[in-house]
Image (cartoon, rainbow, N blue to C red):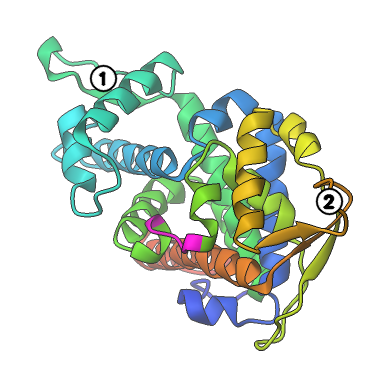
């Protein structure tokens, strides 16, 4: 029977576990499948600043629903929530919420005062967040058989407690929202994270002193562009930048065919992803401790 509550990890400890590459490959595969299944929805939050804003927006939604005395989603309340992390300007946040309404991620919150411009997450947003959170619970279960996903299925209300903790942990984590220079151009561009997942998530464990290029098979920027519905110009720009920094290369000059990635790129990606997965583990552990679950699954 899994330990209860499921363990939590620091990013460094998690990244050092023997099972972490398998954990990471599981999460990446499910995230990429989500991109293919829901391209319109994923595309809107497919760069890091918008992804962070979407997570914090849903966190505010859950916090307000659990305690109506907490502030609801509004432009000013979102600005206040992220101001310390400095992940977006006030104008960007106002525009973000307008787009969230246009994409039906949020809807007006019923209230008497129409001037407040308060909104709530839609059922679609909650479903997407649940899918995202469960992907990472299943991935963490590959590290320690912690039974997190089974608990999430048995106690679905855990999400509304755990997700705000997760979002707040990442807001406080500069290693997440200010990623290493080697990956920043990928993750701060539309769907660049999907390209990065596709490139390096299945690389096996690396020795600490690995310096040689790691061959990852046939890679075509054009094929990745078509798969994740990214413009060819945008994809080519990403690869050109990575190639000029010696982070990626091909056996021939055509930028297609047998491709290699550098150990530096793999390590930066893994440590960055470890920050996120560690935050999930910590948020879920804390939620199980304070929630209404008194014993592990039978």
Left or right, residue 65 beside residue 101: left
- In the current view of this chain or complex, which residue is farthest to the front? 253
Residue 179 drawn in magenta? yes
Could you say whether the residue bearing mark 2 is in a helix, strand or loop?
Answer: loop
- Between residues 65 and 259, which one lies in front from this camera angle? 259
Q: Residues within 10 Å of mark 1 (few under 14, many from 20)?
A: some
Q: Which residue sits at x=61%, y=40%?
A: 237
Closer to the camera in the image, 271 or 119 = 271
> Which residue is at 34% across, 61% downward?
169
Q: Under tag 1, what secondary structure?
A: loop
Provide the residue span drawn in magenta: 177-181
Q: Locate residue 116, reporting x and y percent.
A: 13, 19
Q: Is residue 224 above or below residue 181?
A: above
Main secondary structure found in the magenta portion: loop
Please state if 255 lies on the left or on the right of 288 as rendered: right
Give the quadrant of the C terminus: bottom right
Nearer-N-terminus badge (1/2): 1
Q: Which residue is mark 2?
A: 253
Q: Is residue 42 visible?
A: yes
Q: Residue 141 location in percent, x, y? A: 65, 66
Quadrant of the image occupied by residue 26: bottom right
Q: Is residue 131 left or right of residue 111?
A: right
How many numbered discs, if any?
Answer: 2
Examine the rendered structure and indicate whether residue 159 appears above or below residue 228: below
Q: Magenta includes 227?
A: no
| Residue 153 locus on image (x, y percent) | 59, 49
- On the image, numbered disc 1 is attached to which residue? 109
**Residues marked 1 and 2 touching at CB (< 8 Å):** no
Q: Nearer the viewer, residue 36 or 283?
A: 36
């Amino acid at each position: 029977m899994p330990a209860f509550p499921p363990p939590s990890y620091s990013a460094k400890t998690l990244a050092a576990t023997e099972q972490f590459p398998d954990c990471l490959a599981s999460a990446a595969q499910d995230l990429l499948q989500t991109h293919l299944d829901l391209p319109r929805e994923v595309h809107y939050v497919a760069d890091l600043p918008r992804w962070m804003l979407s997570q914090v927006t849903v966190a505010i939604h859950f916090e307000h629903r659990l305690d109506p005395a907490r502030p609801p989603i509004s432009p000013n309340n979102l600005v206040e929530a992220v101001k310390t992390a400095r992940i977006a300007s006030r104008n960007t946040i106002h525009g973000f919420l307008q787009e969230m309404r246009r994409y039906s991620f949020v809807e007006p919150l019923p209230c008497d005062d129409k001037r407040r411009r308060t909104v709530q997450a839609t059922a679609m947003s909650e479903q997407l967040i649940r899918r995202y959170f469960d992907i990472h619970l299943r991935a963490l279960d590959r590290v320690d058989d912690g039974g997190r996903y089974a608990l999430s299925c048995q106690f679905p209300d855990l999400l509304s407690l755990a997700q705000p903790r997760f979002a707040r942990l990442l807001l406080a984590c500069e290693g997440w929202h200010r990623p290493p220079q080697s990956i920043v151009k990928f993750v701060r561009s539309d769907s660049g994270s999907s390209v990065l997942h596709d490139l390096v998530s299945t690389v096996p464990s690396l020795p600490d002193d690995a310096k040689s290029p790691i061959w990852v098979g046939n890679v075509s920027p054009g094929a990745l562009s078509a798969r994740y519905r990214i413009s060819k110009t945008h994809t080519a720009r990403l690869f050109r930048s990575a190639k000029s920094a010696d982070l990626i290369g091909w056996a021939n000059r055509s930028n297609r065919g047998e491709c290699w990635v550098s150990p530096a790129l793999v390590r930066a990606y893994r440590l960055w992803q470890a920050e996120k997965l560690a935050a999930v583990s910590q948020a879920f552990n804390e939620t199980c401790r304070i929630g209404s679950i008194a014993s592990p699954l039978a």
